[in-house]
Image (cartoon, rainbow, N blue to C red):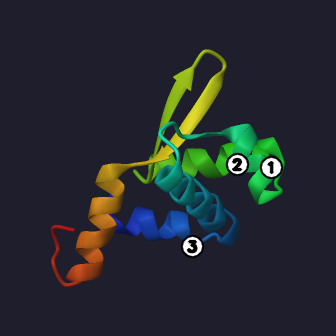
Amino acid sequence: MAGVTAVFKALSNPNRLEVYRIITRAAARRKQGLTIEEICREARMKQPAVSHHVARLAAAGLVDRTKSRWWVHCTPSKEGLAALRAFARDPADRRS
């Protein structure tokens, strides 16, 4: 994970936060991640914007991307979620 500061910076954008929420909600009900196209439909955003937001979330360690032929499937990073949970439990712990 890139660090707590990078995570909060990535999630500080309201549109990016919505994209992250969409990806994490879908993970609870699907085995395979959402494609960029599916995220676009649900978020009502254009493909370049969603791709940009997903790239920023991936750089912060919050989203994993898997390419399957020409589709990119996005899933929440288990390590990213674990780091967020650790920080929420103890913000004073510098290891999170």
- In the figure, residue 64 lies in which quadrant? top left
- Near mark 2 (Cα within 10 A), the count class, few <14, some 14-19 or many ≥20, is many
Q: Where 86 sits versus 57, above or below?
A: below
- Amino acid of disc 2: Ile
Which dot marks residue 16? none
Q: CA distance from mark 2 to mark 3?
A: 19 Å
Task: Residue at 23% x, 71% y: name it.
Answer: 86
Per the image, label 1 sits on a secondary structure element best described as helix
The furthest residue to the front: 29
Is residue 1 something one can see in this rendering? no
**Residue 31 or residue 56, whichever sits in front:** 31
In-image side of 28 versus 70 (left or right): left
Q: Earlier in the sequence, mark 3 or mark 1?
A: 3
Q: Which residue is mark 2?
A: 39
Place residue 35 in its image quadrant.
Answer: top right
Find the distance from the CA under tag 2 to the CA under tag 1.
5 Å
Asked whether, in this view, residue 40 is left or right of residue 24, the answer is right
Say which residue label 3 marks: 12
In the rendered image, residue 74, in percent from the top left (x then y), is placed at 54, 41
Question: What is the tally of numbered marks visible in this picture?
Answer: 3
Q: Quick check: marks 2 and 1 in contact, CB under 8 Å?
A: yes
Cβ–Cβ under 8 Å for marks 3 and 1:
no
Residue sitting nearer the eye, 45 or 27: 27
